[in-house]
Image: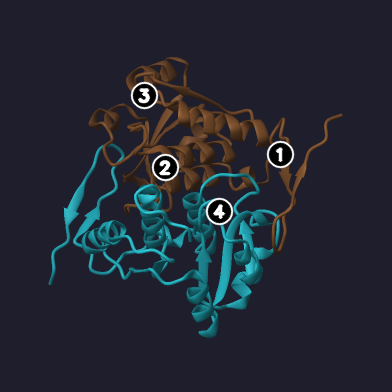
Chain colours: A brown, B cyan
Amino acid sequence: MGHRPFRDNRVTSHVCLTARAFLASKVIISDVVDEKIRSTVEKIVNSWGGPFSVEMGVPWRKAVSNWKARGGAVVLLTMYGENIANSDVLERITKLGKDLMVIVGSEKIDPECYKICDFQVAIGNEPHAETSALAVFLHEFWRGRQLTHKFKGAKLRVIPQKRGKKVIKVKRG
Amino acid sequence: MGHRPFRDNRVTSHVCLTARAFLASKVIISDVVDEKIRSTVEKIVNSWGGPFSVEMGVPWRKAVSNWKARGGAVVLLTMYGENIANSDVLERITKLGKDLMVIVGSEKIDPECYKICDFQVAIGNEPHAETSALAVFLHEFWRGRQLTHKFKGAKLRVIPQKRGKKVIKVKRG
């Protein structure tokens, strides 16, 4: 929410790539279309695998109401919410068992968003970054399992090294 | 490492704020000085507490060699390193018991950096974001305790809410 083309290009790209690497299936960039972001995401998915998609331009209220109509729950990540570290908010979210839409944005979150979300979750109650908040939320949600996930259709794969880089091309059968 | 003033302003600010919120004591922005970043960090520390400081302009090799001369260890966060999720790298770092310098940067990490670091740690071996990598590394390092830390000298404090925002001014004795 609240992406500003050009000014937010890198931050929003980072949110998208974190979403993919931490096993979200899709990102919706609400209200605006930014082909540069789409291109960045598509290049990554093409090389490193998916599935992961990006949708753009849908008004945020519509995206949220469509999601709720389909039976999904909405989590707003904000420093003002229940702290994931000392509340039962993640347990309540998990128990609910619904598909999740996770909303992140800059400091200018639309105040109405605080009303329509089902949960507001703080990754600590200090100011930091939407990218960090998304990463730690998904890290806790998946209990770290996302970090060893094998993505489908990857053309490249890293062979972890104590020192230096090793990237191999994945052969197809 | 590798901050480009203006273009990287928001990403680097997010790295700094994540570092503070996740209990690093200091950030060094190597090789360049960017007063806008300094101002952003100082405003946050002034309102939300510390201690947390920012140093700028020191050449990265000098920052690293000074750190090693003081007995510290150097961790490079990179998607090419040992995966924190399925290796013993964090255990080895913790057992070493040294103060840590954690290096993050854009994709253009100086190749020499791979040689001089003591550990290279991957927060998963997929491309995502330096902000996310730093957040999850520190989250795992502190085992989540950073998320409930009370910062010293805070003028503002969030009272966590299930819905909406509540921020109070902290009274001084």
Indicate the amino acid at tag 2.
Val
In space, the residues marked 3 and 4 are separated at their CA atoms by: 29 Å
Mark 4 and mark 2 residues within 8 Å of each other at the beta carbon: no
Give yes or no for contact between labels 1 and 4 (Cβ–Cβ under 8 Å). no
Q: Residue at x 53, y 34 (%)?
A: A40
Q: CA distance from mark 2 to mark 1?
A: 25 Å
Q: Are marks 3 and 2 on the same chain?
A: yes
Looking at marks 2 and 1 on the same chain, the residue that comes earlier in the sequence is marked by 2
* Residue at the spot of label 4: B108
Q: Do marks 2 and 1 share a chain?
A: yes
Foreground residue among A162 and B37? B37
Q: Which residue is mark 3?
A: A32
Marks 1 and 3 belong to one chain = yes
Query: How many callouts does the rendering have?
Result: 4
Lower sequence index among marks 1 and 3:
3
- Please tell me which residue lies in front, B91 or A28: A28
Residue underneath mark 2: A11
User: Which residue was labeled with disc 1?
Assistant: A150
